[in-house]
Amino acid sequence: MKRVCCILLSLLLLLPLCALSELNEEELEIEEFDADATPAPAEAVWDFPVALEDMDPAFVVLANKHYKLDSSFVPDPLVKMKQRKAAKDGSNKNGGVLFASGGTYKLQETCAKALVEMSEGARADGYKLYLKSAYRSYQTQNTMYYNRLKKNKGKDDGWVSQPGSSDHQTGLGCDVVPRSWRDKAMNGKMGKEPECVWMAEHCQEYGFILRYPADKEDVTEINYEPWHMRYVGVPAATYIMENGLCLEEFTEQLQQAIRDWLDAGGDRSRVEKFIQTPTEE
Ligand SMILES: [Zn+2]
């Protein structure tokens, strides 16, 4: 008897709760069907200086310590750079890119073509550009990184990127140097060479940016590299270079624009491929 009473009492206590939840459901239903209660969202506006259709998600991809590329990531299509040997007098009679060493260099196809154009543009202005490094696979970067650590007794000095975080793995990053630096160890002093001054001034016309500017070391977490060119496409490159940004800052702005677009009810399928999220440390 006592047990039955208990059950009855609990049921009585629960009743108001049930009624309340029913009421809530009802309220929700009313809101759902009352079209006048919530005004239709204003049409989303792409409020970013570079139009979506002027960017290729594959070309604005960010690779760094916090946004690592997968170990299986390989640029597509990856092409071998045709070697154009400098003539004995150092001229570049054949046009195209001169090679700092006899190695085989690979780059993403669009980037490779843009580099040849930039090289020819430089030549027309009287400068010869030498390609010293291009695409590096995850595995190559891995070997380089651990060799460097070993050499530095385990200390990461910031000169060799961790595997997955190298811009060279994108196939859109390349090291371009003046003739006088072909066989020298590279450092920031190279930035004063006329070839590097020319590149800093004209790279965006060919879709390239200076990936690691001198005044952005705290943002890129990479030392100044006047030789490291990164292809992003002309519109993005123009915006980045004219506003003195680095790719990290551009990415931050772009991701914010994407969030704003989605918040305003913009079509997700138009921005989906541009979304980048930090990888786990
Ligand atoms: Zn580089």
Image (cartoon, rainbow, N blue to C red):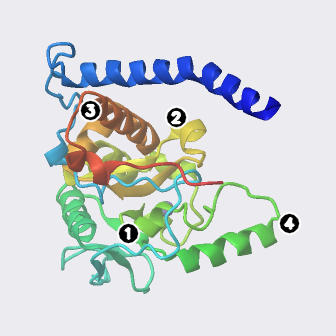
> Where's residue 38, x and y in %?
21, 16
Secondary structure state at the residue bearing disc 2: helix
Q: Is residue 198 left or right of residue 279?
A: left
Crowdedness near tag 1: few (<14), some (14–19) or many (≥20) residues, C-alpha within 10 Å: many
Q: Which residue is mark 1?
A: 171
Quarter of the image containing the N terminus?
top right
Q: In the rendered image, which quarter is residue 174 located in?
A: bottom left
Which of the two residues, 179 or 30, is positioned nearer the viewer here? 30
Is tag 2's residue or tag 3's residue first in the polypeptide sequence?
2
Is tag 1's residue or tag 2's residue first in the polypeptide sequence?
1
- Determine contact: label 2, label 3, CB under 8 Å: no
Dot 2 amino acid type? Asp
Q: Which residue is mark 2?
A: 215
Is tag 1's residue or tag 3's residue first in the polypeptide sequence?
1
State how far apart marks 2 and 3 are (Cα): 31 Å
Which of the two residues, 214 or 277, is positioned nearer the viewer here? 277
Q: Which residue is mark 4?
A: 153
Q: In the rendered image, which quarter is residue 3 located in?
A: top right
Is tag 4's residue or tag 1's residue first in the polypeptide sequence?
4
Viewer-side label of 2, 3: 3
Secondary structure state at the residue bearing disc 4: loop
State how far apart marks 4 and 2 are (Cα): 29 Å
State how far apart marks 4 and 1 are (Cα): 30 Å
Viewer-side label of 4, 3: 3
Dot 4 amino acid type? Lys
Q: Does mark 2's beta carbon lie closer than 8 Å to ligand 1?
A: no
Which of the two residues, 184 or 200, is positioned nearer the viewer here? 200
Residue at the spot x=72%, y=73% of the render?
Answer: 146
> Where's residue 65, x and y in %?
59, 54
Q: Is residue 182 left or right of residue 188?
A: left
Viewer-side label of 1, 2: 1
Q: Which residue is mark 3?
A: 261
